[in-house]
């Protein structure tokens, strides 16, 4: 899976969070990466996402974060039933 979003010099915004939420509604699991030009750390990005949304950061690998959120539309729930049975 390739990262769909990135954090760059524009930093973290509520508009960016809205875009993450929309993408997770369709996919439930996505990756984001921090560009070298980002003024924030992985820990700051993780905290910003988790403090301002119901998105879970399930893994960090270097400058890449893996995000998970259960889709509200049952047609988009492909991963959450598997996670629920774990």
Image (cartoon, rainbow, N blue to C red):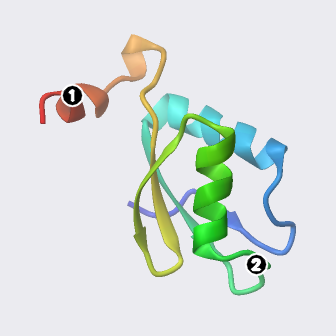
Disc nearer the start of the sequence (2/1): 2
User: Is disc 1 placed on a helix, strand or loop?
Assistant: helix
Whether residue 51 is visible, yes or no, is yes
User: Is disc 2 placed on a helix, strand or loop?
Assistant: loop
Graded by Cα atoms within 10 Å as few (under 14), some (14 to 19) or many (20 or more), the crowding at tag 2 reads some
Image quarter hosting the C terminus: top left
Image quarter hosting the N terminus: bottom left
Residue at the image position 46 percent from the left and 24 percent from the top: 71
On the picture, is 35 further left or further right than 75? right
Furthest-top residue in view? 74
**Quadrant in the picture for residue 76:** top left
Against 9, residue 71 (above or below) is above
Residue at the image position 56 percent from the left and 34 percent from the top: 54
Whether residue 5 is visible, yes or no, is no
Q: Position of residue 3 (x, y in %)?
A: 51, 63
Furthest-right residue in view? 10
Q: Which residue is mark 1?
A: 84
Q: How many marks?
A: 2
Q: Which residue is mark 2?
A: 38
Q: Are marks 2 and 1 in contact (CB under 8 Å)?
A: no
On the picture, is 10 further left or further right than 55? right
Furthest-left residue in view? 86
């Amino acid at each position: 899976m390739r990262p769909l979003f990135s954090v760059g010099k524009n930093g973290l915004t509520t508009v960016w969070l809205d875009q993450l939420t929309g993408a997770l509604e369709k996919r439930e699991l996505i990756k984001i990466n921090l560009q070298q030009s980002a003024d924030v750390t992985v820990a700051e990005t993780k905290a910003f996402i988790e403090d301002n949304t119901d998105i879970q950061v399930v893994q960090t690998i270097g400058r890449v974060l893996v995000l998970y959120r259960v889709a509200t539309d049952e047609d988009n729930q492909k991963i959450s039933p598997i996670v629920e049975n774990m």
